[in-house]
Image (cartoon, rainbow, N blue to C red):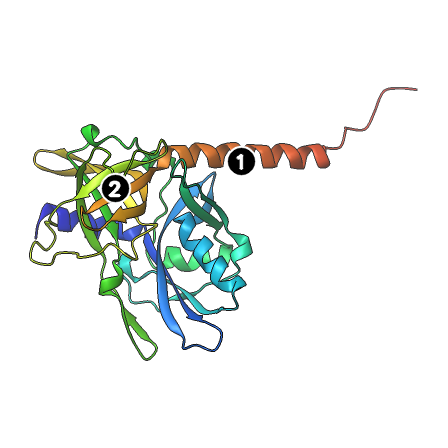
Amino acid sequence: MSHEEDFLRENANKHFVALAYRVTPPGGSPAEEFASCFVVEIESDWYLLTAGHVIERLRRLNVAGAVLSAGRLVDAFAGTSFPPLPADLNLDDWATIDDDETGADFAVVPIDAFTRRGLAAAGVIPLGDQYVGAADFARYRQTVLVGVPAESYSVRGSVGAMRLVMIPLTQQAPTPDMPDKPGTTLGRMAPSPQDPQHRVESVGGMSGSPVFGIVYENGAPAAYCLVGIQSSWHAPSRIVRFCPMTWFIESMHEALAKVRKAIEAADPPASPPDRSDS
């Protein structure tokens, strides 16, 4: 077993979950779909994170009359055989940004206490601030995209199967087909050491997947950083675009600070009683 397979099994797969659901268009047949996601921890709370355009697409389908149902979080990648957890499909709970100009592409939703306990029992580990690193290829021995390609997803009856893969990325300059966007980084897909003979033909379904930078010591992976979230790709050139996680984490801390300040302004702490002699 390669060092990269060890990394996938022992580390990356413990952060990854898939949000599976059924889409039934008006007058049409239901289709089983999923979104690649991962779990982060910010100021002691857990959040589910994916690409903004994934949730925006579901909102457009919803507005057009499609029904979303059978929501579930597939957390078996962490190594347990627990059944998927039920997932709320209320899209209003998600905060999203899908900015074509800058390339920023994030969607985040808080994880409630019940779901958090279920994910923790399944072995899921959230990625906290200490895991986040700069999206700089030069800092890492390897940069890898980890997720589930749609080509590996199949459903028979009520049972679904999917395969988690790790795709190495090499640094890529902007091209006419994948121009520079200030809030993103580009990487070209390389052959996977996890299974060199199984070429991932399409990263469709991997939007929202985490991108990790791996640091090696003595020829083996020793540490890793969460550096980005996969957003889009150009199939002919096999170039993927991902959004740096440092910007997202900083933005979340700023947003939470503003929320706390607003709450304090609306409900200031009571002044202590005046005990001075009258």
Q: Residue furthest top?
A: 277
Seen from the viewer's position, the closer of residues 90 and 276 is 90
Whether residue 61 is visible, yes or no, is yes
Name the front one of labels 1 and 2. 2
Task: Name the residue that disc number 1 marks.
Answer: 255
Q: Position of residue 19 (x, y in %)?
A: 38, 60
What numbered label is drawn on residue 177?
2
Q: Residue furthest front?
A: 176
Quadrant position of residue 213:
top left
- Disc 2 secondary structure class: loop
Q: Quadrant of the C terminus?
A: top right
Which three-letter amino acid code belongs to the residue tagged 1?
Answer: Ala
**What residue is drawn where x is 47% and y is 63%?**
61
Q: CA distance from mark 1 to mark 2?
A: 34 Å
Tag 2: Cα neighbours inside 10 Å, few (<14), some, or many (≥20)? Answer: few
- Disc 1 secondary structure class: helix
**What residue is drawn where x is 31% and y is 75%?**
159
Which three-letter amino acid code belongs to the residue tagged 2?
Answer: Asp
Q: Residue furthest right?
A: 278
